[in-house]
Amino acid sequence: MDDEGVTSASTVSAGAAAPATPRAERTDARPSPEDAVARLFDAFNRRELVDAMALLHSEVVFQPMTAEVTRAGEPYCGHEGIRRYAADVEAQWDELTLHPTQIRAAGQAVVALGLVSGSGRAGSFEDAPTTWVFKFRDGLVVHAQIFSEARNVFEALLGEDASR
């Protein structure tokens, strides 16, 4: 992470540990929101659900692009919803990798910009520009939403164009 709070893709790509960046002393054991988001990306790419759950509020609402196919657009809610999402990723995607290039605080939220690559039963896509928005409660992620091209998900998983 540089002095502006930017995390390079290499620090949060699959198998990489969360960046060890000097921070101001915190009175609690929780990471800063930006570090929590970097750790979530790392946990996702390693498929380490336990590590991810430690950063998520019990009332988390998660709105990923995969839900457009698996849940008719309905979000995954709570820790049970996150477990369902992990199972859906395993069932639907042969590969799904997140490459955040910037992670920044934005008021009461954290915004990450980056690229996603994935392959499913019907096709694949590489380096789709993606924006993630995370909101926090009690130091934990309580809401996460992903913004990207829906057509990538539909084409890779269903072989259909989203403009249908």
Image (tube, helix red, strand yellow):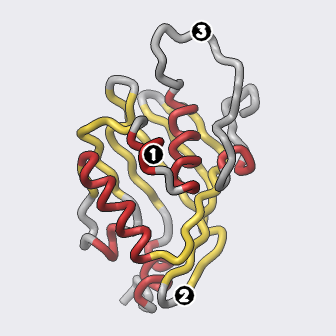
Crowding near pointer 1: few (<14 within 10 Å), some, many (20+)?
many
Query: Helix, strand, or loop for circle 2?
Result: loop
State whether residue 31 is above or below residue 70.
above
Q: Are marks 1 and 2 in contact (CB under 8 Å)?
A: no
Residue corresponding to mark 1: 133
Q: Residue 38 at what x, y percent from top left?
A: 58, 40
Who comes first in sequence, dot 2 or dot 3?
3
Amino acid of disc 3: Glu
Amino acid of disc 2: Gly
Who comes first in sequence, dot 1 or dot 2?
2
| Residue under the image location 49 percent in, 71 percent down | 149
Amino acid of disc 1: Val
Q: Residue 97 at what x, y percent from top left?
A: 59, 63
| Residue under the image location 44 percent in, 88 percent down | 161
For the residue pair 72 and 35, the one nearer the viewer reads as: 35
| Residue under the image location 70 percent in, 25 percent down | 21
Numbered badge on residue 76: none
In the rendered view of the protein, which quadrant contains the N terminus?
top right
Residue corresponding to mark 3: 25
Who comes first in sequence, dot 3 or dot 1?
3
State whether residue 162 is above or below residue 28.
below
Marks 1, 2: nearer the viewer: 2
Query: Helix, strand, or loop for circle 1?
Result: strand
In the rendered view of the protein, which quadrant contains the C terminus?
bottom left
Q: Residue 115 at what x, y percent from top left?
A: 63, 61
Residue corresponding to mark 2: 123
Q: Residue 67 at what x, y percent from top left?
A: 33, 67
Q: Rounded to the nearest whole Å, what is the CA distance between mark 1 and mark 2?
A: 27 Å
State whether residue 97 is above or below residue 60.
below
